[in-house]
Amino acid sequence: MTEPSLAESRLTLTRRYRFAASHRLSAPTLSDDENRRLYGKCNNPFGHGHDYILDITVDGPRDDNGLVVERHALDRLVQTLVLDQVDHRNLNVDVPAMVDVVPTTENLASAVRSMLEADWPLTARLRRVRISETERNIFELEASDR
Ligand code: NI
């Protein structure tokens, strides 16, 4: 077996971003008691904020300059498609991709993936979206097969 060339070896890069946003978790199909039981503190009536950590993982071969992706290009993309939409926003009302769902971080991860996949111009592939809501709640979503 021959060793794959450098250009054929795929590797991943995970780049970290941060944003703050507020939400209130409340399912319209449940009673007040059921919502309190299900969502706990995240059901508090007037909402609250989280400092989210967003890790975006891409993969691909190294280019001639030894990079999987040009960092500035990835940063601009994430800034425009995601951070500008969610940072310092109320996820219940300010983010079009979230208005029809309860703004759990599961649903937020799915919305972020859709925002990126809708307009992904980079050669490196989107591989994974990971969002840390708190130190103990970390959500990962693989990219869609495309
Ligand atoms: Ni919360």
Image: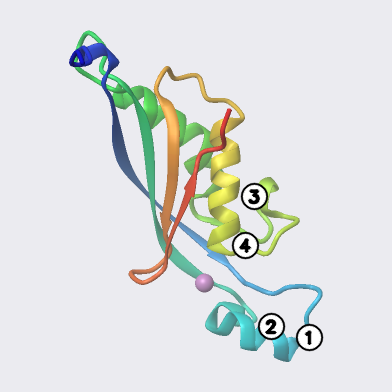
Residue depicted at 37% across the width and 38% down the height: 57
Image quarter of the N terminus: top left
The residue carrying mark 4 is 103
Q: Are marks 4 and 3 in contact (CB under 8 Å)?
A: yes
> CB at mark 3 closer than 8 A to ligand 1?
no
Residue 29, image x, y percentages: 81, 75
Does residue 55 appear left or right of residue 85 in this picture? Answer: left
Residue depicted at 31% across the width and 39% down the height: 15
- Amino acid beneath label 1: Ser
Q: Mark 3 packing: few (<14 Cα in 10 Å), some, or many (20+)?
A: some
SS type, badge 3: loop
Q: Are marks 1 and 2 in contact (CB under 8 Å)?
A: yes
The residue carrying mark 2 is 35
> CB at mark 1 closer than 8 A to ligand 1?
no
Residue 102, image x, y percentages: 68, 64
Residue depicted at 43% across the width and 64% down the height: 133
Kindly report the distance in space between the C-alpha atoms of the residues bearing marks 2 and 4. 13 Å
Which tag, 2 or 4, sits closer to the chain's start?
Answer: 2
Which tag, 4 or 1, sits closer to the chain's start?
Answer: 1
